């Protein structure tokens, strides 16, 4: 409706309505007059009786133009429908086919897109032969490649969104993903582009008929009338101008309406909210830990060879435990979580000496089992729910797919779970769309989605980053409650060490793709040993922080995955680094009970941090204690 509020949108919509009305009524009202032969008025110019003159049989060209609206529009819309449908199918195929087949389809589409549409139309018109059906198929096939390409691009852009990842974690199959989650979210741009394609089809059709390979006598469309009129344009231009103006106006109407709708949609997109999350399970306890990770590596092919953003991460999460993962942006926290959930996409390669969840290698756990035992809560509550589906349906889908519940029972469970996460009026809320929820409510709803089954592990990746402080606290409390009431373990990823310190039992500090320190939370502030952990803590202002002094920062920046060389990656930023740090990377070793550190100089860091005041890092730079560890 927004499109109609602009002058261009309103004018083009009006024009389209006129065209449709003409297509419907003109043949009924003026069909006879358009076909009436008058041998006394052959090839006349415009006159009072014949506004655009007459043709070689004395038929009134003005009425013929009006009557031709039906065939012209009908054929253009038919060609568009066939082309768009074929393009949609071809564009969606890569999402459901095996990778090798998807590549073949994508390459074929890419090659076809390289040919200009009109050239393709002429090519197909010759193949299918002259005539109406041949022209329809020719134009349809000319539209197909660009539409297939558009569908592929839009599908790819939506596939990266959190709600798709959430659905995948839940074990939703490829076909269902495509039809339920992807296509509804790309419908709008597809419809807009179909409108634009109809305008192009109309002009292309007129072109083919004009050239004599489209509509054949005795049928006639604007293109054919234009061709006939052009023969005597120097004598009487009106017979050619009439259909030409009709083609231009109709083409403009479609294109301008498409443009207006696109710009209205673009505007809405900017203000559209979104959301997120996932699932649950029923699995056995495992030996050692619920989640057991050893030497996890995630690599991607880069321009200059492989890069490895996660370089040998090892940790355990036990039943009912809440473990925090902290580190600056790019340290590999999210990739670690994605690898655990089997969500690292091609061409990423995940390897591990051990990656077990609930006693079973994740690689051998079925998607269904993983979907019912593992819940993911993503960072952005705006992008994690499918914006086109009601919250209740999205929650219920989990129980329908994995627990075989009926639609009604699953919806009832969704209401109960929303109530459990303290969303008011859950009966009403399940019928609402994500944009009707506030950010905090969406995040709680995402957690509720995770509770639709019985999750053993909730992975929350920056669940509070996009929320204000009050809502942050509510979400953290909710996670703690989920853990206490359901004995679920929680892996909480955050760049904020204070959030983790407030809620977790243990903290894993990551830097440049590795864990550099693992420490119980109650010892974090008193016994952290890695200079990076110490620096993170020192950078947190507290009530005693001198308000006049500049806030502490960690100098420099973390290395990009491709920049990591020999030695400790933190060495260039570490005030304690010595020669050994620069050439040899320390391993993570146990320095106390449940406390591991990867640092040659960790004892020096302890000494330094003990005298740190008011969050100032400078003291680290003063520390000169020699390395305490020798391996
Ligand atoms: N698909 C990918 N291809 C190549 N590199 C990637 C890909 N995904 C992530 N990376 C790289 O891996 C590194 C770690 O990314 P990750 O998202 O795990 O970091 P993070 O610690 O979670 O940071 P943030 O807090 O910003 O999310 C980054 O440097 C990123 O550029």
Image (cartoon, rainbow, N blue to C red):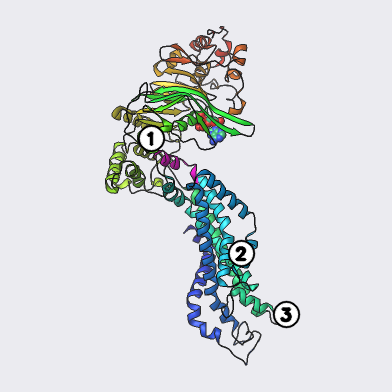
Few, some or many residues within 10 Å of mark 3 (<14, 14–19, 20+):
few
Residue 62 is situated, as x and y percent measured from the top left of the image, at: 58, 81
| Residue marked by disc 1 | 370
| Residue marked by disc 3 | 234
Q: Which residues are magenta?
A: 158-171
Mark 1 vs mark 3, CA separation in Å? 76 Å
* 590 shown above or below 564: above
Which of marks 2 and 1 precedes in the sequence? 2
Q: Which mark is residue 612?
A: none
Task: Please identify, in this view, whether the residue under mark 1 or under mark 2 is nearer the observer.
Answer: 2
* 122 shown above or below 179: below
Under circle 1, the secondary element is helix
* Callout 1–callout 3 Cβ contact below 8 Å: no
* 377 shown above or below 143: above
- Residue nearest the observer in this picture, 69 or 576: 69
Which of marks 3 and 1 precedes in the sequence? 3
Q: Which of the 4 quarters of the picture holds residue 46? A: bottom right
Residue 397 is situated, as x and y percent measured from the top left of the image, at: 35, 45
Q: Which mark is residue 124?
A: 2
Mark 2 vs mark 3, CA separation in Å? 33 Å
Residue 102 is situated, as x and y percent measured from the top left of the image, at: 53, 47
Under circle 2, the secondary element is helix
Mark 1 vs mark 2, CA separation in Å? 49 Å
* Callout 1–callout 2 Cβ contact below 8 Å: no
- Taking the image as shown, residue 481 lies to the left or right of residue 56, namely left
- Taking the image as shown, residue 413 lies to the left or right of residue 501, namely left
Q: Is residue 444 magenta?
A: no
- What residue do we see at 41% from left, 42% from top? 167
């Amino acid at each position: 409706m927004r499109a109609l509020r602009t002058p261009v949108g309103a004018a083009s919509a009006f024009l389209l309505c006129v065209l449709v009305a003409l297509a419907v009524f003109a043949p009924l009202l003026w069909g006879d007059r358009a076909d009436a032969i008058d041998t006394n008025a052959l090839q006349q110019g415009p006159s009072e009786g014949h506004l655009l003159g007459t043709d070689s049989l004395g038929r009134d060209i003005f009425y013929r133009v009006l009557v031709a609206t039906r065939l012209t529009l009908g054929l253009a819309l038919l060609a568009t429908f066939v082309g768009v449908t074929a393009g949609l199918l071809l564009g969606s195929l890569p999402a459901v086919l095996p990778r090798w087949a998807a590549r073949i389809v994508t390459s074929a589409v890419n090659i076809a897109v390289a040919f200009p549409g009109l050239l393709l139309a002429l090519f197909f018109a010759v193949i299918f032969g002259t005539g109406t059906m041949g022209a329809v198929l020719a134009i349809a096939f000319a539209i197909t490649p660009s539409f297939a390409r558009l569908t592929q691009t839009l599908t790819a852009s939506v596939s990266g969104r959190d709600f798709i990842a959430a659905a995948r974690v839940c074990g939703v199959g490829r076909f269902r993903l495509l039809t339920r989650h992807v296509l509804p979210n790309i419908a709008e741009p597809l419809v807009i582009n179909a409108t634009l394609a109809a305008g192009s089809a109309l002009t292309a059709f007129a072109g083919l008929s004009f050239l004599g390979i489209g509509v054949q006598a005795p049928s006639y469309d604007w293109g054919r009338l234009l061709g006939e009129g052009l023969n005597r344009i120097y004598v009487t231009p009106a017979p050619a101008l009439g259909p030409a103006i009709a083609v231009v106006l109709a083409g403009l109407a479609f294109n301008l309406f498409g443009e207006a709708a696109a710009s209205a949609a673009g505007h809405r997109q900017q203000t559209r909210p979104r959301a997120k999350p996932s699932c649950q399970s029923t699995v056995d306890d495992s030996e050692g830990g619920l989640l057991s990770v050893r030497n996890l590596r995630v690599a991607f092919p880069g321009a200059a060879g492989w890069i490895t953003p996660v370089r040998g991460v090892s940790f355990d999460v036990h039943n009912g435990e809440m473990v925090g993962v902290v580190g600056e942006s790019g340290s590999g926290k999210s990739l670690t979580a994605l690898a655990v959930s089997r969500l690292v996409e091609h061409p990423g390669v995940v390897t591990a000496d051990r990656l077990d969840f609930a006693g079973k290698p994740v690689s051998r756990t079925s998607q269904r089992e993983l979907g019912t035992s593992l819940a993911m809560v993503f960072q952005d509550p705006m992008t994690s729910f499918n914006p086109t589906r009601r919250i209740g349906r999205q929650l219920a889908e989990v129980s329908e797919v994995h627990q075989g519940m009926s639609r009604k029972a699953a919806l009832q469970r969704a209401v109960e779970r929303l109530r459990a996460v303290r969303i008011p009026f859950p009966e009403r809320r399940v019928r609402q769309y994500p944009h009707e929820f506030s950010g905090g409510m969406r995040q709680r709803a995402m957690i509720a989605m995770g509770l639709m089954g019985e999750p053993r592990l909730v992975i929350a990746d920056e669940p509070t980053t996009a929320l204000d402080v009050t809502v942050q606290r509510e979400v953290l409390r909710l996670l703690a409650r989920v853990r206490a009431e359901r004995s679920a373990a929680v892996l909480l990823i955050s760049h904020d060490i204070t959030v983790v310190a407030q809620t977790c039992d243990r903290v894993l500090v990551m830097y440049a793709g590795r864990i550099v320190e693992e420490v119980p939370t109650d010892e974090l502030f008193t016994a952290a040993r890695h200079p990076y952990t110490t620096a993170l803590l020192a950078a947190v202002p507290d009530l005693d922080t001198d308000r006049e002094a500049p806030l502490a920062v960690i100098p420099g920046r973390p290395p990009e995955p491709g920049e990591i060389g020999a030695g400790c990656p933190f060495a260039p930023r570490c005030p304690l680094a010595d020669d050994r740090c620069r050439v040899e990377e320390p391993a993570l070793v146990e320095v106390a009970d449940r406390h591991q550190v990867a640092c040659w100089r960790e004892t020096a860091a302890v000494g330094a941090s003990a005298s740190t005041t008011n969050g100032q890092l400078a003291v680290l730079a003063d520390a000169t204690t020699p390395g305490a560890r020798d391996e």
